[in-house]
Amino acid sequence: MPEKYNSSPFIKKPHDHYFKSVGSILEVALELVKVGLPDKIYQQLDLSVFEISNTTFVDEKLEEHLSDLIYTSQLQKSGKPIRICLLFEHKRKISIRELNLQLVRYIVNILEEDLRQGREDFTLPIPIVIYNGAEVWTPKFLREFYQQLPEEFHRYLMDFEFDAINLNSLTDAQIETLYDSMLVRNIFLAMKHAFDDEFYKNNFQKIFIFASENVRPTVIEMLISLTTSYIIYVSKLKKEDIMQAAQAMPIPVGTQIRTTATNVFEEGWFEGIEKGIEKTILTFMTKKPETSDAQVSELFNLPISRVKKLREMLKPPVQKQRKKSSKKIA
């Protein structure tokens, strides 16, 4: 890889970056919540008010272990606000006791934010932990570490549960049966097989055909760019490997893969993926100029200041006018 590629701060945590990037896309977020929550819980959510928040409750002590994505919604019947907290565990090995303590700290951070905001009631946090480490594990909740405790003492326990997705405990066949979550299916396969070069070489179709109804073309383009860049970084595939695999793909998908791969190998991860996403946004604004900066900012999860700079790039260059001569004609 080029030295520029390895030196970019953008790739210090490739799994974390990929997780947060794809999870910040609304269509993907909705699928992640559907896959991560029990059906009885999911069915009670009012998805008409579902939003992606730019808040984080990972403090300095937690950031070595966790990254988070926050989704806000409410319950259909009561209108009670909730936060769905998608937490990605960084470590390749997991300590269940340590994870429980991390979640306690994380939930306390949320409750403290409610106090600072002067909310009358606490907002219910629903944690979903995604783990992609080397170990197969079964979630164990905090109360289970207090063995042989008389029942009358149970009232003193901190008692909460969390949902978990352990990618390594899921078989490929199980992931591939996520027919109503086709975007997440591909993302899970890409993450589960990180560092498995042979799987990547032989399964581009499974990873890159983001077949899902009613998904914006710009979203598909972003997912292809992000996934291509992710695979290049976590594998040892060379540029020619990517180009050869892309040849067997449908033309639009293959073209997107080759373009992103060229950018990443020639310009480095940060410059390549940024250029790919920037091009997608510029294309979108060109095709739909009526979309406001605020709408573009929300759609692509970008600061509005950056959207304004991209908008400026679409304006035609201002031609300098010749100064009128002050000399009078005799």
Image: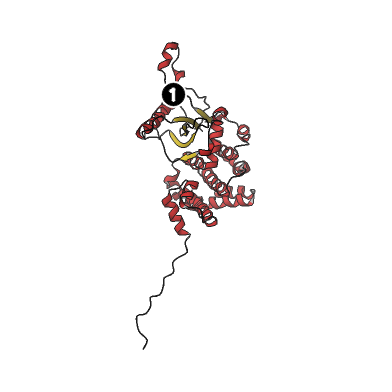
Looking at the image, which is closer to me, 196 or 151? Answer: 151
Kindly identify the amino acid type of the residue bearing the numbered disc 1. Answer: Arg
Q: Position of residue 128 (x, y in %)?
A: 49, 31
Is residue 176 visible from the viewing direction of this image?
yes
Q: Position of residue 315 (x, y in %)?
A: 47, 61
Q: How many callouts does the rendering have?
A: 1
- Residue at 57% over, 29% down: 39
Quarter of the figure that contains the C terminus: bottom left
Question: Would you call the spot at circle 1 few (<14 residues within 10 Å), some (14-19), or many (20 or more)?
Answer: some
Looking at the image, which is closer to me, 83 or 105? Answer: 83
Looking at the image, which is closer to me, 262 or 321? Answer: 321
Q: Is residue 219 left or right of residue 81?
A: right
Q: Position of residue 82 (x, y in %)?
A: 47, 32
Q: What color scheme is it? A: secondary structure
Q: What secondary structure is found at the residue carrying circle 1?
A: helix
Which corner quadrant of the image does residue 237 belong to? top right
- Residue at 50% over, 44% down: 233
Asked if 323 appears above or below 140 in the picture, the reply is below
Is residue 195 visible from the viewing direction of this image?
no
Q: Position of residue 272 (x, y in %)?
A: 49, 51
Q: Residue furthest bottom?
A: 330
Residue annotated with mark 1:
97
